[in-house]
Amino acid sequence: MSGKVLGLLSAPGGVGKTTIAATLGWFFRESGKKVLLIDMDPSISLSWLVIRDDFELMDYEERGKTLTRIFQLKFEMEKRVDLKDFLITKRYPSDRDLPIDLIIPDLKFTNIVDSLWVNRARREMMLRDVLEELDVREKYDLTIIDTIPFFDRKYSILLTYAVDRMIVPLRPAIIDVYRTQTMLRELPRATALKDEEIYGKIGILFNMVRANTKQARNIGTYTDLIRRKVYAELKVFETVIPYYVSFSRIGTEEEQSGDREKVRKSVEALFKEVSEWIPS
Ligand SMILES: Nc1ncnc2c1ncn2[C@@H]1O[C@H](COP(=O)(O)OP(=O)(O)O)[C@@H](O)[C@H]1O
Ligand SMILES: [Mg+2]
């Protein structure tokens, strides 16, 4: 088996990376795929979404069941790491759903990445090397990696080298369009990769689209603008994700009847598009 690796990247924060990572993970699990979620955001938002228990998270952190520890062992101590020692398995979105595997970071993840970044050869390959050592492509059909916005470019560089495909969400607003196109134009320089190498991996996704608004009607214009400024053949998902409060309620005590159906319907089309887009 050669599983694929999908990353989430964005220029502004709060555009739905974590939500989309978790939701796609859920959908791919339900379709019978083996899925691994990797949370590479030191503020542990994806981990929180899946685990939803402070004490449990603290316990994993104390026991070193974290991505931070993986980086320490592999790069500082040059020891071998075994995926099964770091896996956390949880039912998601709720206790009634299928289990999904997860690797979590902790607050110290920033420190280790910063210190390794200083003078390590092949530093941009660290995440890719970790995935190889954990053998995720052999063990999972799909590995989904969530990260933080481009303002910490180290994570974006690590991610770019590690993934086959990258979803870049943004809201349909000119400020997000501007920041996204600025980030995308900086990526080749930041990663020292060729335009087509990077842009060929990327799919732009409009999220939080409020129906019948000017911003929603502007999506075509925004798409043209990004393609014109960045890369003419840039993939932009035909699916747009509507703004529904249901997204933040799924799996929580506040979940209301109908929430799942709403989310399911709006993500179904994206799930299909992503499935076809991921190379086989
Ligand atoms: N399509 C959507 N409709 C409504 N709320 C959303 C949608 N997508 C994300 N959200 C909410 O927006 C907030 C930010 O999303 P999040 O996934 O954490 O963004 P990021 O990971 O990019 O910072 C969360 O509260 C999330 O529940
Ligand atoms: Mg996030």
Image (cartoon, grey):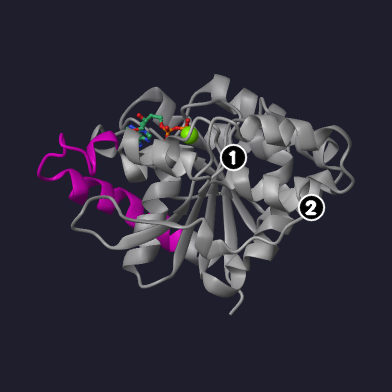
Q: Residue furthest top?
A: 175
Q: Which residue is mark 2?
A: 196
Disc 1 CB within 8 Å of nearest ligand 1 atom? no
Residue 91's spot in the image, x, y percent?
29, 56
As shown in the figure, which amino acid type bears the numbered disc 1?
Leu
Distance in Å between CA atoms under marks 1 and 2:
17 Å
Dot label at residue 9: 1
Residue 234's spot in the image, x, y percent?
66, 48
Q: Secondary structure at mark 1?
A: loop
**Left or right: 91 in relation to 105:** left
Query: Is most of the magenta stretch helix, strand or loop?
Result: helix
Q: Specify the quadrant of the image occupied by residue 149.
A: top right
Disc 2 CB within 8 Å of nearest ligand 1 atom? no
- Give whichever of discs 1 and 2 has the lower sequence position: 1
Quarter for ligand 1?
top left
Residue range highlighted in magenta = 248-273
Q: Is residue 146 above or below residue 265?
A: above
**Left or right: 173 in relation to 232:** left
Q: Quadrant of the C terminus?
A: bottom right
Q: Residue at x 30, y 53 (%)?
A: 92
Using a 10 Å C-alpha cutoff, classify the residue at mark 1 as few (fewer than 14 neighbours), some (14 to 19) or many (20 or more): many
Q: Residue at x 63, y 24 (%)?
A: 179
Choose mark 1 or mark 2, whichever is in front: 1
